Image (cartoon, rainbow, N blue to C red):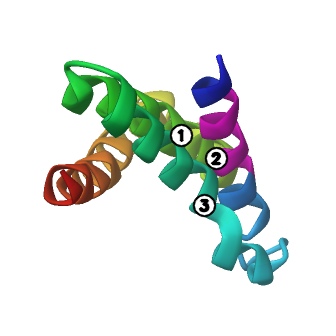
């Protein structure tokens, strides 16, 4: 439950730091809760890659839905596809960090 809340917090902090209407200074602390999740998973659980991938995907999906929700007005399928692919690509990058940190 704690990891889920930290993932949600990361997604919200990333959305708040979006430069269009947000406060860009939050970008410097936005990834800290996700890094706590990564460390917690790395030290406590088995099958850590899939577990961390799930949390990071959820984090980036929250961020993408908040910041690019306006794509719904262009095309619902386009918004869903863009959010899924973008979240997948971002999650793969932090998954590489997780593998390298192990």
Q: Nearer the viewer, residue 42 or 95?
A: 42
Q: Is the C-beta separation of discs 1 and 2 under 8 Å?
A: yes
Q: In this view, does 16 lie to the left or right of 6?
A: right
What residue is drawn where x is 42% and y is 40%?
A: 56
Most foreground residue, 97 or 60 = 97
Upstream in the sequence, badge 1 or badge 2?
A: 2
Magenta span: 5-12
> Circles 3 and 1: CB distance less than 8 Å?
no
Query: Disc 1 and disc 2: Cα gap in Å?
Result: 5 Å
Residue 59 has which mark? 1
34 or 44: nearer the eye? 44
Above or below, 9 relative to 16: above
Q: Can residue 55 be seen in this view?
A: yes
Q: How far apart are marks 3 and 2 (CA)?
A: 11 Å
Disc 2 crowd rating (10 Å Cα; few below 14, some 14-19, many 20+) is many
Task: Tell me, yes or no, whether the highlighted magenta stretch contains residue 6.
Answer: yes
The residue pinned by badge 3 equals 32
**Front of the two marks 3 and 2:** 3
The image quarter in which residue 13 lies: bottom right
Asked if residue 27 is positioned above or below residue 61 in the image, the reply reads below
In the structure shown, which secondary structural element does the residue marked by tag 2 occupy? Answer: helix
**Residue at point 32% right, 38% down?**
42
Residue for point 31% across, 34% down: 53
Question: In front of the other: label 3 or label 1?
Answer: 3
The residue at which mark 2 appears reads as 11
- The image's mark for residue 68 is none
> In the image, residue 55 lies at what x, y percent?
45, 31
Which comes sooner in the sequence, label 3 or label 1?
Answer: 3
Q: Is mark 1 on a helix, strand or loop?
A: helix
């Amino acid at each position: 439950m704690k990891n889920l809340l930290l993932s949600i917090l990361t997604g919200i902090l990333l959305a708040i730091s979006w430069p269009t209407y947000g406060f860009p200074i939050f970008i410097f602390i936005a990834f800290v809760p996700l890094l706590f999740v990564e460390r917690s998973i790395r030290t406590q659980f088995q099958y850590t890659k899939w577990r961390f991938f799930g949390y990071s995907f959820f984090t980036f999906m929250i961020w993408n839905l908040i910041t690019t929700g306006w794509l719904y007005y262009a095309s619902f399928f386009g918004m869903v596809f863009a959010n899924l692919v973008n979240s997948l690509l971002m999650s793969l990058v932090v998954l590489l960090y997780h593998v390298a940190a192990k």
